[in-house]
Amino acid sequence: MKELVYHRMLLPALDRHANKTAFIDGAYQSTYAQHGDRVFRLCHALRNELGIGAGDRFAVMATNSHQYLELYHAAFLGAGVINPLNLRLAGPELDYIVRDSGTEVIFVDQFFAQHLHDAMAASDEPSPLRHVVLIGDAEVPHTIKYEDLIGAASPLVLDEPEEDDLAVLMYTGGTTGLPKGVAVEHRAEMLNLYHIGMSIPFEEDGSYIHLTPMFHAASMGGIMGTPAAGATSVFMPLYEPGAAMSLIEAHGVTQTMMVPTMIAMMLGHADFAPERLASLKWLTYGASPMPSALLDRLLSMYPDLNITQGYGMTESSSLLTWLNENDHRIGGARLQSAGRPAPGVVLSIQDEAGNEVAKGETGEVCAKAGNFMREYWNKPDATAEVFANGWYHTGDAGYIDPDGFLFLVDRVKDMIVSGGENVYSAEVEAAVSKHEAVEQVAVIGIPHETWGEQVHAIVVLRAGGEVTAEELQEFTKERIAGYKVPKSIEFRADPLPLSGAMKVLKRELRKPYWDNQERAVN
């Protein structure tokens, strides 16, 4: 029987809460019945007007909005496979993802339509896009407007998809220098929702505000859980702390998810006052390191607020471990941990040979769970490598204490988490190394009070080569997204330290920056 499909969650909520205000997006408001009508019309339009089959990909490049949620829900009802695009993608990255995913239909809002057009036009290959659907109203390149598409369609409730059908294709940074498509099935997304729902409540009389970008896996709880519970969703297109506080106050928001950077920006805002967040009952943070001083301030300021932390990755649809509200109130050493495994998740700390190590010993964090991806799109070798011996290998190093709490201490893979965004050093190094003056480059993450980690490049120039840090940053920005560009560049005269296998010893490069830090990784 097909139990793990979103039909069983969303359709009853549409009926049970038909006349309740479901979504608030600026001046736009809709009831659950109106939302259902729009989603069913979208399903019809995707299938019959845009030619999207059940396994076909359609991309979305847009800020947070009710339209974005409608597109997610259409995908979860089986209308196609949604490919949410990072808003910070540079032109070549965007072009690569569209082509690699086989995307022929893309939904884009007025903020990014021109960028999309320019990216595809700059390619040497003809654009594979058949339709560009514009969300909003602006004089930018498109083939049809979103509202016209829905307005001309009839409601269509599709048959339930199979549990092993793909629902989401979400691209993440690539260790080989190219983004990897994380292909996630309906079953995995539903199990991830159940894991979240067993960790925090989705309350019918509550409200959730979308502050994290909806292209991010960390937003899945709000995208799926809040509507299924019959709660109200509030949207903020792009995060701005002052406006976020105003929306929380105006709509009595009870729940949200934030990256620590967002929390720091809000508490440091000129208009911040503790009472402005008085309606919040649940605050979840994750996706980047939480500075201890910031967490201490948050806990002391809001003793009654249920504060929780999630750790995971795009490949796990997002959740692996959870530090719950009671753990935060107890405090102590566990606040430096990533929590304990979510329901349905099994962790194993393994050495380089794949053997499980004893409690308290450090090794690579490996996991088994039903909410993992099916594969990396078009990358069977990378898929086999990451699922070696039946375990997903996170690339993070850590240990489990006697009480079952996971502590992350270093990175096996060279991934940097800056402001909640994953940056793979190999991708940045590939871009920097293209400059003719660069002989060697190593990219590492160094501590940053606001962003958690900052992208830092260590460069050795060729004999006679000349380039300034600013020139190298501009050169790199033309090739990769702005958030991946090194925020600081250090030039060295001596060659970079190498291991016996002729690999750069990044642990040595990182050591001076992280030696006095309480927490190296999240």
Image (cartoon, grey):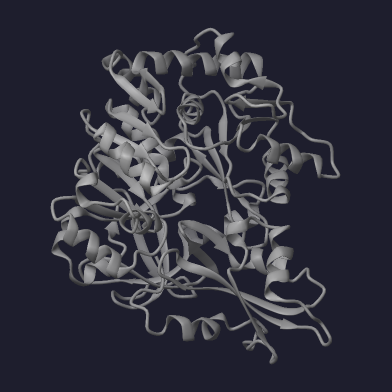
How many numbered discs, if any? 0
Image coordinates of residue 4 in percent, x first then y, are 38, 31
Residue at point 49% right, 51% down? 315
Residue 199 or residue 185, whichever sits in front: 199
393 left or right of 54? Answer: left
Q: Quadrant of the N terminus?
A: top left
Q: Nearer the viewer, residue 392 or 63?
A: 63
Residue at image coords 68%, 74%: 469
Compared with 11, 269 (above or below) is: below
The reply to whether residue 394 is in sight is yes
Q: Quadrant of residue 137?
A: top right
Considering only vertical position in the picture, is 375 above or below 236?
A: below
Q: Is residue 465 left or right of residue 480?
A: right
Residue situated furthest right in the rendering: 124
Residue ID at (19%, 47%)? 275
Give the side of residue 363 with respect to residue 470, left or right. Answer: left
Q: Is residue 127 above or below residue 175?
A: above
